[in-house]
Image: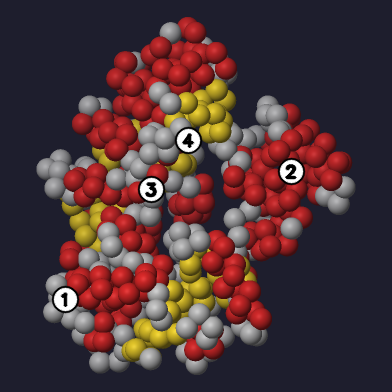
Amino acid sequence: MNLTETQKEIVDTAGNVIVRASAGTGKTHTMVAKIAKEIKENRDHRVIAAITFTIKAAREIKDRLFVDITGHFINTNNSFAIEEVIRPFMKDAYGCQFDCDMTTDYSLRFNNYNKGLTCISEDCTLGTYEDSKKNFIFELALKILERSEVARLYLQSKYFKIYVDEYQDCDTTMNEFFMYLTDSLNIDLFIVGDDKQSLYTWRGAKPEAFKSILTNENFKSFFMGDNFRSNKQIQNYSNLLFEETSKLYDEQANLENIILLTCTKEDWFKKIENFWDENKSSALLRFTNLEAEQAAEVLCSHDMDFRFIPKPPIEDISNEARWIYNAIAHFLIVDNYSVFDFIYDIPSGTENDSKLKSKLQKHLHTIEANVANNIQFNENVSKLFKSLGYEAQPEDLLALYETISTKKYVDAFASDDVKHRTMTFHSSKGLQFDQVILFVEDYNLRDEVSFYNHYVATTRAKSKLIFISIKSSYETERFYQNITKRLEKSELSLEKLVTIIR
């Protein structure tokens, strides 16, 4: 994909930059192009950090970069705070009692900052707050920077630019940390996000923090609104959900790409058949996993081959070794996942260690050869853990074995091969499908959070969007009331945007 004029300007702009990128506008493509350009043009010893919320997103950035990224930090938010600030400078900031080989276990919870420090000094374990909206990792990292001159000098001498993806999902403490990097340490930031796609306010995400930077005089602000994913009718509908993008509305005579079906709980699947194309990829998105699973059962029982994509048990592992369980599962399930990918996923980064490669190959092939024997499997996995300096926990081994031996969880690792699926709209973020089916009762639109959810769900669709409207549902009625109010601000109605089948 070539760069648009706006994307070129973003790539060429130096200093602090914030980009508000609507769904499907190529934000990752733009950020990768900017990273590659600035790595090539850098003339000193310093490097960049590209920080994301998930390992998967970090891998995507690495895979897209065709420049030498040796020495550059491309990983998750927590990895940056822990590996670049907390572990190396905890002792300098807080004293010799914190000179320990620190592990991470997010199942270890406490209710105040001092108890978190006690867990580190006494148990050498980095935990998290009981309140999921509070962020101990970044609070600790920020305090270390404030207390340790060595830590500040280290970051200043190492990094010339830090890129932060999905900034709308940052909480208040994360925002304070990143603003400290630029305001106090003079490290340039490149921030990209979209407050309309904030799905994690329930765990403390503050899209308001992202919006506040848009008017920060120290940042150059850009807007990317050209959607390369969805057709124009779907773009129109999603853009009209928010005032700042409503001006992008472009009236369309053909409304066949968004269908609203008025149904009952007993006949909704029958009505879909007249508008759904089984030859094109599709996703039915629901609010909960249970609703998604039940929808798949109904559709399959009526010869519509939809498959529910569940969350594998290893996703609930919260300690620092979770990446190993995930890597083992990928090695056993995904055909093209090799020992090199395993090394690629090691948080400390040892991809050039040939001795580690040989050791890993031996362990992984032994695990693979004994996968049918649960006891032998657990023993071999435990040996691999010990070789990497970790200890496997019994309950986590159980979760791993259930993940790799249960078909529905195996499907989650090969979901790209599933043509028609059901899942939650939270799980769909970052994905795209030819057709998307939504129940309007999942979006009462009574607050901005519900509008964010609805925006993310609708913008997963490329060519067709099917709304299911269940009669006599209270939440359905709330949807109609609130979408009508929102559209009236643009002097439009639902009837002018979608085809309604009663």
As drawn, 211 above or below 465: above
Q: In the rendered image, which residue does mark 1 sit on?
A: 488
Q: Residue at x 87, y 47 (%)?
A: 373
Q: Quadrant of the N terminus?
A: bottom left
* Mark before the other along the chain sequence, 4 or 3: 4
Residue 23 picture location, percent across and down: 34, 65
For residue 398, the mark is: 2
Q: Residue at x 84, y 45 (%)?
A: 374
Disc 2 versus disc 4: nearer the observer: 2
Residue 441 picture location, percent across and down: 40, 71
* Mark before the other along the chain sequence, 3 or 1: 3
Task: Tell me how far mark 1 sits from mark 4, CA to CA.
Answer: 45 Å
* Mark before the other along the chain sequence, 3 or 2: 3
Disc 4 versus disc 3: nearer the observer: 3
Q: In the rendered image, which residue does mark 3 sit on?
A: 202
Disc 3 versus disc 2: nearer the observer: 3
Task: Tell me how far mark 4 sits from mark 3, CA to CA.
Answer: 22 Å
* Mark before the other along the chain sequence, 2 or 1: 2
Task: Tell me how far mark 2 sits from mark 1, CA to CA.
Answer: 54 Å
Dot 2 crowding, Cα within 10 Å, few <14, some 14–19, many 20+ = some
Query: What's under tag 3, amino acid-wise?
Result: Trp
Disc 1 versus disc 4: nearer the observer: 1
